Image (cartoon, rainbow, N blue to C red):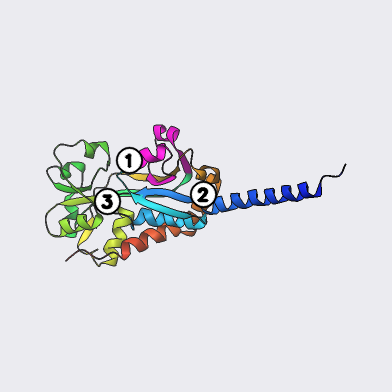
Amino acid sequence: MLPDKKFTINCLISITLYLSAINISQSQQVIQSAVAEGFTDALHSKYLKYIAKRLALDISITTMPFARRYAELKHSRLDIMIGLQHNKTRGNEVIFVYPHYESLSYRFYSLTINKNKYQTHQDLQRKIISTNRHSKYYPKFDNSENIIKFETTSLRQNIDLLIHGRTDLFIHYEESTQPRLVAHGLTNKVSKIDYQPKMEIPHFIAIAKKSFLAKRKSEIEQIITAGIESGDFSKIREKHYSYIQPPDN
């Protein structure tokens, strides 16, 4: 018996409307993410927008402290987070995307005229060293009570304090610091010291387990791999730190 023509047409219309609804729903999906307070147009935001663009998705970026960002990601109230260091606990709580998109190196900097004064860790004792707020470096430094640590919120502040004689040194990522010093003609004034512990730190992107992005993990991995091979992540970082207003001289 042939199916009723009217019934067949109605079924086709229903299927078409259903598929259209799926397409509309997918096109309206917006990635939810967050960065540190006061950094809505900073480096991590630019990395996130880069990934969203290649996924052909819109992204909404708000601000909140690191601990809250991670908690929101863990409970799938954020879709994606950038700048995470991997550990076993986090690996069970969220989905890490491989490979890591960059590996950064903490370095100590002083005025160039003083860089040879620091040959060992002992030479840091009783010195005023500016550090990034909430950052951890390496146990020997973090646990030292004889080093005077002064917390800051930006690379610019680190450089300003050093140049104006308010601190003896600062510690920051070399991959951020060197482009800034070169761009603003400060390489003769500020230099890496002779003593440098080995601190290569891989940084990852992570996805919430219940996020719609979890189904696109392999696609995001391909985007990251391509971004590394093309040098896109390095170019974004270098451009970001080269075009910020220089510290006062």
State the residue in front, 228 or 219. 219
Q: Amino acid at mark 3?
A: His
Amino acid bearing label 1: Arg
In the image, is residue 71 part of the stretch drawn in magenta?
Answer: yes
Quote the CA–CA distance across marks 3 and 1: 23 Å
Q: Residue at x 23, y 58 (%)?
A: 156
Tag 2: amino acid: Ile
State the count of labels: 3
Q: Is residue 219 left or right of residue 8?
A: left
Of 17 and 219, the residue lying toward us: 17
Camera-nearest label, 3 or 1: 1
Q: CA distance from mark 2 to mark 3?
A: 28 Å
Tag 1 residue:
68
Which residue is disc 2 drawn over? 220
Residue 112 screen position, x and y as percent: 19, 59
Residue displayed at 41% across by 41% down: 77
> Element under label 3?
strand
In this figure, which residue is indicated by the disc labeled 3? 172
- Quarter containing the N terminus: top right
**Nearer the N terminus, badge 3 or badge 1?**
1
Which image quarter: residue 246? bottom left
Disc 3 residue crowd, few under 14, some 14–19, many 20+, Cα 10 Å? many
In the image, the segment drawn in magenta is 68-97
Closer to the camera: disc 2 or disc 1? 1
Look at the numbered discs 3 and 1 and tell me whether their residues touch, using CB distance below 8 Å.
no
